Image: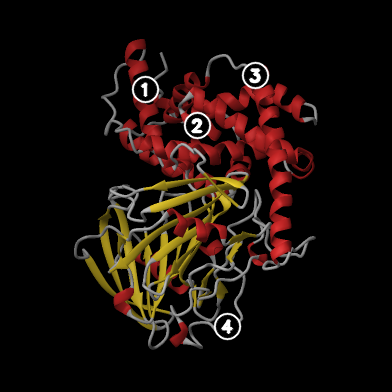
Amino acid sequence: MSTDLEDALAECMRPHGAGAVDVEALRTGALARGRTVRRRRTVVGVAALVVVAAVGVVPVLRGDDGEPVAGPGNRVLTLPPADAPGADAAPGSVGTDPGVFHFDVDPTDLDATGATWSIGGGVESVRLWSGRFDHYDHEFQLARDGAALRAVSGSGAAAAQTRAVTVNGRAATARFWPDVTSSNRIPDVPTWSVDWQPVDGLFARVQVFTTDVGAAVAAAEAMLPDRSQRCVTPMRLVGTAVPLRVVACTVDFGHLFPWTLSEVTLERGDGVRYTVGIGHYSPADDERFTPNHSVGGLPAMLTRHEGRPDRPDGVSIRVPVIDGIVLSVRGGYRDTDGRREHVPTTDADILAIADAVRIGPNFDRPHTWPGVTA
Amino acid sequence: MGDTFEEYVTARGAALVRFARVLVGDPHRAEDIVQDALARAYPRWNRIVRVDQPDVYVRRAVVNASRSWWRRRGSHEHPVQRMPDRTAPGDLGDEAVERDALWRQVNRLPHQQRAVLVLRYYEDLDYVTIGRILDCTAVTARTHASRALTTLRQHYGARTPSTSGRQT
């Protein structure tokens, strides 16, 4: 049974789909582009395999090994387990290794279709997306220093309500903001956050877009501090001219693609940082791709951003690798109290890092990717 | 509908473009999104036909591709906050104004809710199929629709079939 509103919806949509369609042009264009995609996939896929096999840094895995594989219809992908104790058994390890998360959250319990895992600054976190907002619904954070936890996104004011609750039997504090404006400019999102210590010496915070404090507590109880996982990327750096250590790692699953991107932050001995990422970078952030360099035989675009306050990373290079996947290197900058300050960087600095990246072929199998090590 | 890629595009291409036009709200971009979705499907077409329904696969690709476009567009537009007061049925000019206002409200919805509404009320699909396209359960798809309708009703006013404005 339809309502007047439902009838009106169908009516208001109909004219926007109307009009002639040139099916022949669509068919010809799709075939031409499809053949290009197939050719690029074959050529670059073979090239990636040759590079990886020659350098020998990433094992070339083949066959169906039963590991989670990204693909249409699959649920949000998971990280591979780490050979390390969880936060409950090793609380002192939390936030110390950019390659290991010391907790897990089952995204299916929270109806998540996307997950952004991050380690950096002593905080391990995951943001879960369900698609209800164009923004994450849940954010879990875990750290040894409670002051390192990020404040509730966009709150900017004292909580309207504070309640004492319990999370898995441990005392917790729930706080409510009725009208948080999210970082994606979605206004008036009601938010509960819950702060507790899942283990003595550790601080956890979960932020949930909900008006239901019970839902926030239930989410907090979905944190699993008895597990550990690896932060992984389908790339590795080999033989950089200057020693670099990994200080942060991010893996983004879901949203537009089963795997969206992986990024690591590298730091030189003098504190200058670079971000190296690979994945489906948003076309919204794209400048028109005009190759002006070459990296590993592939066309690359190096851009200098000096003088742009919105781009404190200074210099960036983008290398389209295959099928919409882009290698990105940005830097250098210093991170001071969470603020990035640009550090003068030469083209050669950025190119040297990009040239040192070795890309693995199995973009759809995170459980086959190498782990990140500091 | 045949199993070859060319036969599929010939049979379903027009419908896919119309669906994308409603989803994206930009006819030129819609054709580009559909062409790109089909191009990406082309190298794996045999597998898609074998293990997936091509319509589900391609619509899913179109929805995913439309998301970034829609979000970019949404950041530049400032849709009306409320719909104009509803007018008496039968006035074609007022009905067109009302339809446009409802369309703008649909554009304000989060992408997933908007996608569900287009699949449900333009494509006339059931929630099981919508769930397969959006990679969620039928219950979740229905929940998206329910939330979207609740939002729209705040502007449109709750109505029942017996009070349809199109009755004479």
**Please, what is the three-letter code of the amino acid marked with disc 4?**
Ala
Q: Which residue is mark 1?
A: B100
For label 3, the SS is: helix
Within 10 angstroms of label 2, few (less than 14), some, or many (20 or more) residues?
A: many
Residues under labels 3 and 4: Cα distance?
A: 56 Å
Q: Nearer the viewer, mark 1 or mark 4?
A: 4
Identified by mark 3, the residue type is Ala
Above or below: residue A209 compared with residue A217: above
- Mark 3 or mark 4: name the one nearer the start of the chain: 3
Chain at tag 1: B
Q: Residue at x 38, y 31 (%)?
A: B159
Res A25 label:
3
**Kind of residue sitting beneath label 2:** Leu
Quarter assignment of residue A31? top right
- Camera-nearest label, 1 or 2: 2
- State yes or no: discs 2 and 4 in contact (Cβ < 8 Å): no
Q: Are marks 3 and 4 in contact (CB under 8 Å)?
A: no
Q: Residue under circle 4?
A: A84
The answer to which quarter of the image holds residue A120 is bottom left
* Precedes in sequence: disc 1 or disc 2: 2
Q: Which residue is mark 2?
A: B23
Q: Residue at x 66, y 56 (%)?
A: A364
Question: Farthest residue toward the left?
Answer: A158
The reply to whether the C-beta atoms of the residues labelled 1 and 3 are less than 8 Å apart is no
